[in-house]
Structure formats: C-alpha cells, structure tokens
C-alpha cells in the first residue's frame, strides 16, 4: 500500500491547510459562538469545520492510490456515526439496564439481571404488553400484506384510473402516526346507545346497526385487534407499492409464454408471480415488523394510556419518564431491541449469504 | 356483456369501495376543518358544514403553525437531500467496491434501523449537548441524517446491486476512478432510488416528534411539536386542530400525490427488492 | 488526480451549501419566541473573522420557563404572568417553552433529557410536594430557597400546613403559585331534585350515606357518579375515597417514612371496599372517555348526578364557550366536599423551582419573585381557576367558588393529593398507578389490589 503513495506537494499542502483550518475552527467554536446578522450559526459552523477537516484527511487518503482504502475512508463517517449513535448508545442502554438507576441522579451500581427478573416476575403489565404486541404485530403484518397484495393484483390489471387509486392507497403513509391516531380515535369512538359517534354513527345512519361495535374497548384480547386498523390504513399502500413494483418487474414475456401454454390468469398469478414475490414479502415483513414492535405514538393517541392496550413502547416511556425509573426503562428497551433482532438478524445474514460476489 | 367487462366492473367496485374507506378519515378532517366551533358536535360529525366554509380555522391554524412550518421545511429539505446523497455513496461503495469486511459493515449499519428511539434519548441529548450541536436545526438535521443512514444505504445498495457490473467494467477500461465511476455512470442511473429515498426520508423527518421535541429549543421547534401542543391542550378546539393537522400534513401529502409515481417507479426498479 | 480533487471540492461545497440553506431561513412571524441570545465573543477568543454581534444591553436576556400549560385557562394565566413579568423586568424576556401531551409526560421527558444533558431551563413547573422533593431535590437539580423566603417574607404569607410539605429538612425548595383543591364533588341540582336527594349541610359525612343517595339516583335512571378514563381520573377518585374513608390523619400516616398507617391494614381495606362500591355506580363507558371533561360534561348535561374532580372543573363549567359550558353556579352546577372530606382541603399546587446550573440565575430569581408576589398570583390564579398560595390575595378578583375555597384554604385541615404529586414521588406514584389500572380491569380483586399497593410502598423504599 505504501508503495503506491505518491506525494504531491501542492495537494499535501492543501490537505494540511484544510485539516488545520478545520481543527482551528473547531477549537474556537468550542468556546465562542458565531453570530452573523443576529442568527446563531455556531452548530452549522461546527459541522462545516468537521467536514473541512475530513476533506483534508481524504485528500491524503487519495494520495495512496488505493481504492479499497479510499472506500473505507469514504465510509468512515457513516461507520463512525453509526458506531456512536447506534452501538454506543445501545451499549449505554444495556449498561444502565444492569444498574439500579432510579431518579435524576445517575446510579450505575451493578445489579446484574435484576431489572429483567423484575419485569418477568409478578408483573401482569408486562404480560399484557407481550400479548398485545404479539397480536398487533401478527394482525398488522397479515393485514398489510393481504391488502397490499390484493390492491397490487387488482391494479396490475391496468385499468383506467390506476394512478388515482394508487395515490389514494399510498397517501396515508404521509401522515404522522400521531395525527392518524387522533383522527381514528374519533372514528372508532366506542360509545354505543345514546351517544353514538364516529363510524358507529355512520353505521347507524346507513341502517347498518348490526355493525356497531365497541372497537378497541371491546373485551380483551380482541380490543387490541382494532388498534391495527389505523396502522394498516397507513402502511398497506406502501406494501402495495412494493408488490406492484415486484409484479410489474416480472417480464411480460414470461406471462405471455405461460398464456401461450394455456395457463389462466389466475394460474399465472398463483404459480409464477406469487412465488417470485417472496423476496418482497420478506422485505415488507421486516420493515413492518420493526415498526410494529416499536409502536408507541399510535397506541397512545388511540388508547389514552388504557392499560389494556399497553405495549412495550408505552411501558418503557412511562417507566423512564413518568416514574423516573431509568434502569427498568432501559431493560424494557433492550428487550424490545432483542425481539427485533431475533427477527432481523437471520434475515440479514441469509440475504448477505445468498448474494453473489461482485 | 363479456366476461372481461364483468370482471373489470367487479374490480372497479372493489377498488372504489376500498378507496372510499381510505378516504374516510380525510373526509372527516376536511369537513371538520371547515366548520365553525358551534357546529362541532359528535352527533353531527359526518355532516357537511351548514354555513359555508369557515376558512378562519385555517388562518388561525396557519398563524399558530407558521414559524414551526418554516422550521420543519428548513430541517427536512436539506436533510432529505443530504441523507440521499450519503446513502447513495454508501450504497455504491458497499455494493460495488467490496473489501474484506464490507458485508459485515453493511449488516452492522443495517441493524441501526431497528433501535427503539425512546431508549436512546438520554445519551443522545447528552452527546449532542457535549458536542455543542444541541438546540437548533443543524443538529436535528445531522441526527436525522445519521439515523437515516441504515435505510438509505439499504435502499441504494439493493438498487446498485441490481445494476450489472458490465457498465462499470467498461468505465474502468476507459480509465475512470472510483469517484469518477460514481459521478459519470452510477449517479445518472440513480434517479428512481433517489426518488424513493428522498420521499421516504422527507416523510420520516417531517412527521417525527421525539427527536424534534428533545433536541431543539422552543424557537426552533418543528411543526410536529406545535401540532402536539395544539392537540394536547385539554380542551381541544377540534375544528382548528383538524385544520392544523391538514396544514401540517400538506407538504408530505403533496409530495405523495405529485411524486408518488416516481416513488413507485423507484420501487419497481428494485430499490427494495429482496 | 485533479478531477478527483475538484470533485471533492465540489462535493464539499455542495454539502456546505446545503447546510447553509438549513440554517438560513425566511425570517418568520414569531409568536412569543425570543430574540437570538446576544452573546458576545469572549474577548480572549475574539478572532477577526467573527463578525460583530449586538451588545447585551440592546436585547433583553431570555428567561426560559418550562411547563405543560398549553390548555385554555392555564395558558391564559401563564400569559398574564408573563406579561406582568415582561413589564416589570424589561431587561428580561420570557421564553415560554410549554410542551403538551401525555398528562405532562412529554414535558417531563423533555425536562429529564435536558437535566441529564446539563442544560436546565431557567425554571420549570413542578407540583409542590414529593414530586419536587422526591424527584428534583433528590436528584440534586434545584437549590433551597431559604434566603428567598426570608428576604421576601413569602414564608409568612403561606399557610402553616403548607410550608412543611414543600420543604425538606426545613428548607423550602419551591415557590407555590396556585392552589387547587382535589376533593370537590360537583353535582347537577336538577338531577338531585328529580331523585329527591338532598345533601346534608357541609356534605356527606361518610360514603355509606353517599351510596344511599346513589341508590335513589340510580332509580331515576341516571348515573350517580361519573368517571373519566385511566389517565389520572381514576386515581383522583381513589384518593378521595381513601381520604373520605380513613380521614386526614390516617391518610398522612400512609406517606410518612415509615408509614404509620398500615398499607396491609383495615383502613386501606375498607377504602378499597368503598372504592369498589363507588365504581359500581359509575358510567360503564368511563375508560373510553377521552379525558376528564366528558365525565364532568355528563353532570352538566344531566346524564349523571355527581362527579368528583379538582376545582379546575369550575372553569370548565362556568366559563364561556369555546372553553367552557357557560353554566350558572347553583343553577347549572353546584359543589360540595367529597363524601367524608368536609373540613379537609386536599390540595395540589403548581410551583416553580430554582435550578442548579441554569444559564440565567438572576432571571430565575426575578421570575420567582414575580410568581411569589401578590400581583403575580392575583394575575395568574383567577384566569387559571385556582386560588393563590398566598393567604393575602384579594378575593374580589375571584369567582364565588374560589372565594369559598380561599376561606376553606385558610381554615381547613390541609393534606396533600396523591394524584398530583404532593405525598408521593413519581416512582411510587407510578407503581400505585399500575396497580390501580390493573385493578380497574377487574374490580373484584380487592385483595390483590391491596397487596400490590403494599408492594408499591416497599419498592418505593418506604415500607419494610
């Protein structure tokens, strides 16, 4: 590697100049503030200084004329960022989940797995969480996949107005979970009898009274099932887009050949297209599952902290910030992470392994 | 009537039925957003406004949200673009310039997508405060970019993996360097996946609340915080709240309505395949 | 080679320009947002490239006040105090950093993260009592206020029973601004008249009498006691049942360290039994209501007879639309102490603290001075629907209900509310909250509930 190092003096000088400039700026901005025309530009200047320093470093790296090293050099900021912001912080979280930090003053006293034990023993709330999250995840994923696939197949028929339907099904994704929760809480108003409201009211107005239900206040465990409705509303369009992309990318020739062989449209879908969509299903399941295991905003907006609708995300939030029990909150967070990892790591490993080398 | 026509008609009926269900919440939001307060009643929530369109709600909502809408725009637009550029670079390097450990690095980066954000709030704030990026918009932009690295890298890497190496080989033979290949060959081909990533990151950052409320000072709060305050005041003025929600959702809504086809095209071109 | 370098330069410039775009923005019409802090570069580090900034005298220094007062009434009260402050202390300007949502948990989350980062606001809203002592004092985040109380004489205008509740080891730690009463039972006179129920003078003396009245109400087809969702309304009802059953002294005894009232004992058992019976008279859709207001509205609409809620409900009943129901006192609604609690004032109080290590301690002291002053409290409380913490406010500013409350505040036995952070710190309260919520899913499991309460006391470190 060193053999190929060509020292190009002007570039070296520029590199050193950039690095020097960047580091000096960082040093100054550490204690002073940069205010131009009344607006505070300090953070921006800090970021820029960091970038300038890094550009200087990169120029030196280029002089090595080694593309693998350059690759690593260009990836380094991302790697460093992920190392700190993801793994560093997770490490911190794990560390305090093994402590007994309670209250605003950090307390790193080691207690081993005590927080985890507390979560699982004599803790009906956590059992409710696990049951709810399991039910939510399963129903949410099945619902999105079914609706998404259904819409994709229907829209694949290339009818007129496809673009309009696509937009209608896709746009709920653009709404935040909080807003969606507020509106659907209104829609799924559980009052029956005199104070009908929301969809129940609509059923009544349409003389469909037999459909009136208590929505998510129905007796458990089915009440939780209703909470997936807003989530499916938001994400089935995304699933549809994934499937539609996958279906459309299957070449028409393959379908024509099957038609020539006498296969019906239905058979084409069942035996050719669906199997080819498996990788997409896998991607979709991973993305949907990681959202549902962390779900928080939506359930709070719908359920107003009703404990029958509790999920780990809410439990962690209230344990950490309402009760101030940071150690136990961290333990719940680590458990959430593990539950996602159990799903994701095999997928990532198998994906990487099944790829061919460049 | 041919069988085809019956089939088509049935498909239309199904699609229209679901489209109506999908539009139900929007209908409610719009109708409520245009009603004056004395018409807000759970019993009449489905009815159209009886006394014309009460635009004052939107004006009031806009006055309350205007500074925050600006903050959001300032934050999201650079964030989406920079995040896409970074993801594109990463995806290109990880897909086409494999070195020892690049798969491991990709897996480790990808895993970052799955952390629950509530559990890292405290170390995040402490760290941002320590590096003096706490309190205003550039810090929030940086955080969104960093937490967007996994998904953007994933999308671009999958996309580039689908582009054959022959093009690159040809470029190599013409003497292009690593960055030259990127600039002259890969980047021009990246349109669809840029569309997907920019739209996705735009939406995520626009609708995000936790980082927004925790990492910025009051004068830099994005629109999600303002909307939360509007919704969280114990006696809610539903009409103004619905108008505000519509306003806050408008940019992302427009992005999806007008750019949705590019999103789709990008997904079709293999951005999230397998 | 040069193309690579120019490529890099171009890239660096692109990134730089994007980031510049992010920091520049259209100057926006600001609503109560401050000027940028006019910090002058320290002389020792003054470098010529940094452009000159405005000097400190031109712009007022911001004082950041943190709360969750976003709703009507409370926001108005805060705005009035802020206006008064900005007028009296023109060298400062208040930055109102209120964050709503989650019954205050959003605000608490933001506050906790800021305290963890070492960037506290200049002052924040904290419930007086254990929520402050057990959280912020124990966490070493606030300073004692002995000097302040001495120099302003504030301690002398507070009721004697209040001072120990906001102090630790004899040192006061917060400045109470308002006082709310928890043990108020609101009722609809018309519903009672139809059911031929009369309330004894001074209120029901015990819960059994109340249940007899409930039977009469139930016979007319109305709900006797309306209740809201799990957020805090259930705990609010529960604490009032407890106090009404066991009395003020035994209630205090639950919260001493160690408790002198046994959590496993008969007093708590009887309270739970009363609570279970009270629940049987509540509306079946309690858990589905969106907040406490719909439960109070049931009383206003005549669907329910009674509703036990703090006296912020008074503003909801009496104020004009859209924030209130515009009802006339004694006609559309009326009030009486919760059963068993006459002569007892179950209080909660919002207060402000003096942080350790905030940016602007002088600004904080100015804010505290205003919050403690007669003018400040008289500006704030009538709008918020509460009464002054001070005993010398002018009653003329207040509603009829509040005037009665002010008299009671001066004469009744004062005990602290559990729901609103006086008697128990956040951790203990959260444990009780979980136990209560689980109990609500099946109110027949009283023994389990009592066991959970005792366990909560242990995990809070108070019981053995």
Image (cartoon, rainbow, N blue to C red):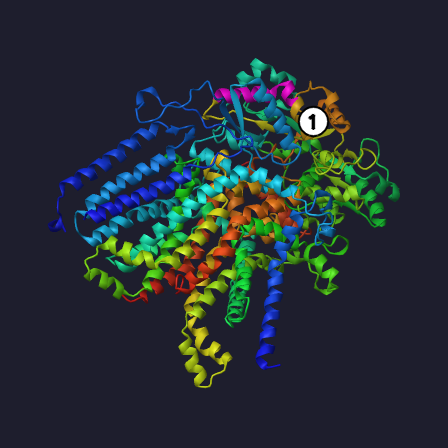
Can you see residue A105?
Answer: no
Q: Chain of mark 1?
A: C
Closest to the observer: C92 or C360? C92
Closest to the observer: A261 or B126? A261
On screen, residue C138 versus residue A79, left or right, reads: right
Q: Position of residue C139 (x, y in %)?
A: 48, 31
Can you see residue C201?
Answer: yes
Q: Is residue C159 above or below residue C339?
A: above
Magenta-highlighted residues: C361-377
Q: Position of residue C434 (x, y in %)?
A: 59, 46
Residue to which mark 1 is pinned: C382
**Does dot 1 land on a helix, a strand or a loop?**
helix
Residue at 39% from the left image edge and 63% from the top image edge: A347
Q: Is residue A78 above or below residue C379?
A: below
| Prevailing secondary structure class for the magenta stretch in the rendered image | helix
Q: Quadrant of residue A132?
A: bottom right
């Amino acid at each position: 590697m060193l053999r190929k190092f060509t020292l190009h003096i002007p570039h070296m000088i520029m590199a050193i100049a950039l690095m020097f400039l960047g580091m000096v700026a960082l040093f100054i901005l550490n204690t002073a503030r940069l205010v131009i025309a009344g607006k505070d530009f300090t953070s921006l200047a800090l970021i820029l200084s960091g970038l300038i320093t890094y550009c200087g470093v990169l120029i030196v790296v280029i002089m090595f004329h080694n593309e693998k090293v350059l690759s690593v050099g260009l990836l380094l900021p991302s790697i460093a960022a992920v190392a700190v912001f993801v793994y560093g912080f997770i490490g911190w979280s794990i560390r305090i989940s093994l402590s007994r930090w309670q209250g605003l003053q950090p307390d790193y006293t080691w207690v081993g797995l005590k927080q985890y034990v507390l979560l699982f023993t004599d803790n009906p709330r956590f059992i409710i969480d696990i049951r709810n999250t399991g039910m939510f995840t399963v129903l949410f994923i099945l619902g999105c996949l079914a609706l998404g696939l259904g819409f994709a197949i229907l829209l694949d028929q290339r009818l007129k107005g496809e673009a309009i339907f696509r937009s209608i099904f896709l746009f709920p994704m653009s709404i935040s979970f909080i807003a969606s929760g507020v509106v659907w809480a209104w829609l799924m108003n559980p009052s029956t009898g005199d104070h009908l409201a929301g969809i129940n009211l609509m059923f009544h107005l349409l003389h469909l009274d037999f459909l009136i239900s208590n929505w998510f206040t129905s007796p458990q465990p089915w009440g939780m099932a209703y909470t997936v409705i807003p989530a499916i509303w938001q994400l089935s369009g995304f699933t549809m887009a994934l499937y539609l992309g996958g279906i459309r990318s299957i070449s028409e020739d393959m379908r024509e050949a099957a038609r020539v062989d006498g296969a019906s449209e239905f058979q084409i879908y069942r035996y050719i297209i669906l199997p080819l969509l498996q990788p997409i299903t896998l991607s979709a399941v991973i993305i949907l599952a990681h959202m549902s295991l962390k779900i928080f905003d939506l359930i709070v907006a719908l359920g107003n902290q009703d404990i029958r609708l509790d999920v780990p995300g809410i439990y962690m939030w209230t344990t950490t910030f309402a009760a101030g029990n940071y150690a136990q909150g961290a333990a719940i967070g680590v458990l959430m992470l593990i539950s996602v990892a159990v799903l994701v790591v095999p997928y990532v490993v198998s994906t990487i392994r099944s790829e061919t080398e460049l | 009537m041919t069988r085809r026509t019956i089939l088509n008609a049935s498909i239309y009926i199904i699609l229209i039925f679901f489209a109506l269900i999908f539009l139900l919440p929007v209908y409610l939001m719009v109708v409520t957003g245009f009603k004056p307060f004395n018409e807000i009643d759970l019993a009449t929530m489905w009815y159209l406004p009886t006394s014309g369109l009460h635009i004052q709600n939107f004006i009031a909502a806009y006055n309350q949200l205007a500074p925050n809408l600006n903050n959001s725009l300032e934050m999201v637009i650079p964030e989406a673009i920079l995040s896409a550029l970074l993801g594109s670079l990463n995806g290109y390097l990880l897909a086409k310039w494999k070195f020892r450990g690049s798969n491991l690095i990709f897996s480790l980066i990808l895993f970052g997508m799955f952390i629950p954000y509530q559990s890292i709030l405290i170390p995040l704030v402490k760290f941002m405060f320590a590096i003096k990026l706490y309190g205003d918009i550039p810090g929030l932009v940086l955080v969104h970019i960093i937490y967007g690295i996994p998904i953007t890298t994933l999308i671009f890497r999958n996309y580039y993996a689908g582009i054959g190496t022959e093009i690159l080989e040809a470029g190599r033979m013409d003497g292009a360097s690593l960055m030259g290949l990127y600039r002259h060959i890969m980047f021009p081909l990246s349109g669809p996946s840029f569309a997907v990533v920019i739209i996705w990151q735009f939406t995520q950052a626009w609708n995000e609340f936790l980082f927004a409320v925790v990492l910025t000072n009051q004068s830099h709060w994005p629109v999600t915080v303002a909307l939360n305050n509007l919704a969280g005041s114990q006696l809610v003025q539903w009409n103004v709240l619905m108008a505000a929600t519509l306003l806050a959702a408008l940019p992302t809504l427009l992005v999806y309505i007008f750019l949705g086809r590019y999103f789709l095209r990008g997904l079709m071109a293999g951005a999230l395949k397998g | 080679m040069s193309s690579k370098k120019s490529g890099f330069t171009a890239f660096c410039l692109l990134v730089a320009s994007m980031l510049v775009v992010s920091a520049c923005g259209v100057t926006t019409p600001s609503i109560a947002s401050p000027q940028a802090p006019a910090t002058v570069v320290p002389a020792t580090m003054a470098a010529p490239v940094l452009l000159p900034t405005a000097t400190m005298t031109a712009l007022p220094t911001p004082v950041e006040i943190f709360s969750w007062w976003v709703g009507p009434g409370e926001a108005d009260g805060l705005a009035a105090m802020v206006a008064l402050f900005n007028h009296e202390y023109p060298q400062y300007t208040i930055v109102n950093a209120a964050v709503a949502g989650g019954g205050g948990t959003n605000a608490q989350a933001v506050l906790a993260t800021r305290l963890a980062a070492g960037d506290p606001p200049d002052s924040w809203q904290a419930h007086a009592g254990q929520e402050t002592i057990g959280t912020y004092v124990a966490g070493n985040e606030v300073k004692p206020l002995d000097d302040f109380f001495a120099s302003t004489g504030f301690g002398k205008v507070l009721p004697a029973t209040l001072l120990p509740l906001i102090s630790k080891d004899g040192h006061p730690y917060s400045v109470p601004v308002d006082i709310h009463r928890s043990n108020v039972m609101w009722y609809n006179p018309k519903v009672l008249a139809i059911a031929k129920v009369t309330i004894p003078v001074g209120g029901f003396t015990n819960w059994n009498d109340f249940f007899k009245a409930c039977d009469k109400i139930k016979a007319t087809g109305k709900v006797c006691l309306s209740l809201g969702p799990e957020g805090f309304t259930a705990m609010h009802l529960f604490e009032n049942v407890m106090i009404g059953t066991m009395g003020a002294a035994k209630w205090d005894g639950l919260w001493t360290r160690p408790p002198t009232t046994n959590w496993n004992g008969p007093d708590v058992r009887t309270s739970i039994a009363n609570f279970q019976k009270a629940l049987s008279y509540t509306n079946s859709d309690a858990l589905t209501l969106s907040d406490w207001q719909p439960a109070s509205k049931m009383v206003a609409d005549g669907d329910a007879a009674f509703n036990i809620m703090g006296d912020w409900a008074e503003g909801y009943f009496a104020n004009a639309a859209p924030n209130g129901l515009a009802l006339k006192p004694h006609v559309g609604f009326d009030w009486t102490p919760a059963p068993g609690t006459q002569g007892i004032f179950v209080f909660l109080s919002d207060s402000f603290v003096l942080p350790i290590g905030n940016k602007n301690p002088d600004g904080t002291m100015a804010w505290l001075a205003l919050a403690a002053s007669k003018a400040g409290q008289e500006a704030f409380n009538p709008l918020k629907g509460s009464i002054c913490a001070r005993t010398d406010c002018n009653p003329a500013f207040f509603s009829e209900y509040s005037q009665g409350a002010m008299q009671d505040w001066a004469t009744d036995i004062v005990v602290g509310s559990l729901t609103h952070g006086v008697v128990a710190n956040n951790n203990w309260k959260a444990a009780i909250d979980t136990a209560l919520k689980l109990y609500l899913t099946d109110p027949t499991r009283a023994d389990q509930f009592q066991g959970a309460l005792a366990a909560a006391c242990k995990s809070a470190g108070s019981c053995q």
